[in-house]
Structures are given as structure tokens and as C-alpha cells.
Image: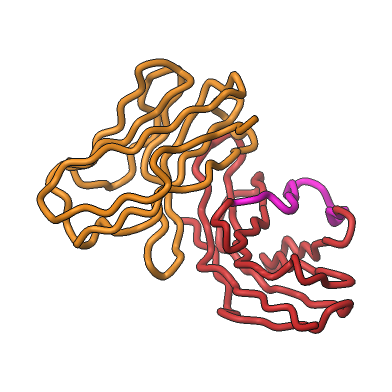
Chain colours: A orange, B red
Amino acid sequence: DTAVSQTPKYLVTQMGNDKSIKCEQNLGHDTMYWYKQDSKKFLKIMFSYNNKELIINETVPNRFSPKSPDKAHLNLHINSLELGDSAVYFCASSLRTGGYEQYFGPGTRLTVT
Amino acid sequence: AQTVTQSQPEMSVQEAETVTLSCTYDTSESDYYLFWYKQPPSRQMILVIRQEAYKQQNATENRFSVNFQKAAKSFSLKISDSQLGDAAMYFCAYRRHNTDKLIFGTGTRLQVFP
């Protein structure tokens, strides 16, 4: 059973399009995260949600909007995609907020052409 | 602001040998956690080992151990009896106590030769 899953695993799209990446965790965790790993493998946190409430919001363009319909899901919607958005996006979850171990999903490789 | 530095972009080791990956960090906090994550070609981020800053004893997980030097702000990972499956990117990461923000280093690519 996959603990943290993401769909799709690969996403190729053109500049200007709008796309979403879905994340689901079946661990019963309260807190979920989105990380971005750029072409140089640098990994940086973007957002975190705790029980559907936004907790961490790093300096991310407004074109990125996380949505949490329930605490098991955290989707990432990206508007007006740009070439620089090409990256691997990781979802993660932890039991709750306040410094618990984070479990990562397999990542979604987004390529913007 | 906290930063994590991995000064070795690439390392290589022969199978069955030992290799040490370096990590230094900068923080003014006294209570924090340090981690090593492994990212194989499958992209999955796997937690290898973690160290609580308040613990003097170095963490160990089977063939993986750390050398935690709090005063020097150094946190190296030693892999003993290296195996082909250890080949991956290794990321050092820092998290302040009671926070969720993981700060990663730039990674070290480890190659293992038979």
C-alpha cells in the first residue's frame, strides 16, 4: 500500500497552460507539504497544510495555489505555467504539525515546453 | 537564516568500502534536528538517519552512522560496507525543533563501483 501517492508521475505541458498535481496520503496524518526540486536537485519547501489550514507559505508566485479538500489530500494547482516551473514536485505528510517525521511521495516531474 | 552546505557534489566508493559524506550547517538555534535523506534514481526520498541536537550520542542505523559535532556545526554520514544499492543522491537536512520546515543541502551524488 502506497503511503503518499502523487498523480501524475510525469506531466509535460506547454507554457501558459494550467495544470494540477494531486497528492493523497493514507497514513492518517494531519499535515501535508509540497516541495519543489529544481534542475540542480535543490529541494525547497513551498507550502504546508495542517487539517486543511495553510501553515507554511514560502515565497512562491501566486500562480501556485494549493488546495486541501480534506486532510488526506493536498493538490497543487499551477496557473499560466512558465519554463522555470519545470521541476520535480514532491508531496509529503507528517503525523501533525510541530516537527514530526515527514514521509515523501514519489514526486511528479513537470516539464514545461 | 539557517543554511545547510554539502561541499561534495560527487563522491565514489568501491563496494564493501567505507565512505563519508560531509555536511555543515549554520543556525543560532540550540534545539534542532538533522537528517540524511537518500534519493535513488527512482526519485523517492528516503529517510536514512536522524539526529537530535540535544543528544550527544551519534545516531546509527545498521551500516549508516553519523558524526555529529555540534560546536563545529558539522554532521557527516558514514556508510560502511558500501553496497551497489547505496548509489544515490544524499541530502543533508535541518529542521528547527517544533517546526515543520525542512532545509536541505544541495546534495551529494554517491557512486558505488563493483
Please tell me which residue is depicted at 66% across the width and 47% down the height of the picture.
B33
Q: Is residue A43 left or right of residue B50?
A: left
Q: B83 or A65, which is in the foreground?
A: B83
Residue B113: x %, y % from top left: 75, 83
In which image quadrant can residue B12 be found?
bottom right
In which image quadrant can residue A47 be found?
top left
Residue A98: x %, y % from top left: 57, 29
B55 inside magenta stretch:
yes
Specify the quadrant that holds the C terminus of chain A: bottom left
**Residue B23 higher or lower than B51, as above or below:** below
Q: Is residue B43 left or right of residue B70?
A: left
Residue B69: x %, y % from top left: 76, 65
Q: A40 or A113, which is in the foreground?
A: A113
B114 inside magenta stretch:
no
Residue A1: x %, y % from top left: 65, 30
Please tell me which residue is depicted at 40% across the width and 55% down the height of the picture.
A88
In which image quadrant can residue A18 be found?
top left
Q: Is residue B92 left or right of residue B16?
A: left
**Residue A22 higher or lower than B71, as above or below:** above
Q: B80 or A88, which is in the foreground?
A: A88
Highlighted magenta segment, given as a residue range: B45-60
Please tell me which residue is depicted at 27% across the width and 54% down the height of the picture.
A12
Please tell me which residue is depicted at 33% across the width and 44% down the height of the picture.
A58
